[in-house]
Amino acid sequence: METTRLTKPEAMIFDMDGTLFKTETLLIPVYHRLFDQLREEKLYTGDTPPEERILGGLGMLLDDIWKRVLPEHDVTVHRRADELLLELELVGLKEYVTELYPYVLETLRQLQERGVRLFVASNGLEHYVKEVANTHGIYSLFEGIYSAGEHQTSSKVDLVKLLLDNHGVNRAWMIGDRSSDVEAGKENGQTVIGCAYAGFGQGQELDGADKLISSFAELVALYDQAVDFSDQREAAKP
């Protein structure tokens, strides 16, 4: 992990699951209902796979998640699982008590007050990602909410590139909890802030991040302590 001082960004790009949203508060009950339905439709038999399989897949594209959760089943079952997951998640957001991580709302507001442009880039489905933001009162804080489901991108690298290009962003912090977030930031030449509080990934998940945070609220101090881009350019002159 680099120890160089960070430069203030124009924008911050947030992953959703495991970064803003405490996903397990929705996903665990939905996961069990999904497998009840698959069994009812005779598409699956036996016990529900361990919860760790889907929690460990958070941040992946859905195709890769189902290969991990249902490796013995074909694409027909995987596509039905896609449909059920979205349907049950949207219902669950209304039925269950779900949570953002501590200080997410307050921190986003403080960053916006400082003039930071805020975005979401998620490998999830469009309606799910947007409904999580809407349900928890943070939708209006974002200039754009990008999802692999809406833009049909094959990787988060491509999704973040699209976002940067569409909004004319040159300097951003990519903030997330998975290796796909680190890769998306670094491959696009941006600073990466790794969220070490979710705990879904393995030990090396955030290798390569510029900074790690153990609470979402730390972002405000990181931003305030970062160097202005113009000041850094002056300091770099011979």
Image (cartoon, helix red, strand yellow):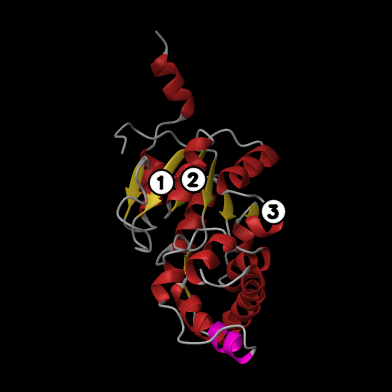
In the rendered structure, which amino acid carries the disc numbered 1?
Ile
Three-letter code, disc 2: Met
Q: Judge whether residue 213 is colored magenta.
A: no
Q: Residues within 10 Å of mark 2 (few under 14, many from 20)?
A: many
- The region drawn magenta spans 34-40
| Circle number at residue 193 | 1
Magenta: predominant secondary structure element? helix
**Closer to us: 193 or 178:** 178
Q: Is residue 157 visible?
A: yes
36 lies left or right of 199? right
Residue beneath disc 3: 152
Residue 54 drawn above or below residue 164: below
Can you say whether 123 is above or below 28 in the image?
above
Which residue is pictured at 44% across the width and 79% down the height?
A: 49
| Residue drawn at point x = 40 percent, y = 32 percent | 227
Please tell me which residue is depicted at 66% across the width and 42% down the height of the picture.
162
What is the residue that sits farthest to the top in this orientation? 238
Separation (CA) of disc 2 from disc 3: 20 Å
Residue 113 sits above or below residue 86 on the image: above
Number of numbered discs on residues: 3
Can residue 100 be seen from the camera position used here? no
Q: Position of residue 108 (x, y in %)?
A: 50, 56
| Cβ atoms under marks 1 and 2 closer than 8 Å | yes
Identify the secondary structure beneath mark 3. loop
N-term-proximal mark, 1 vs 2: 2
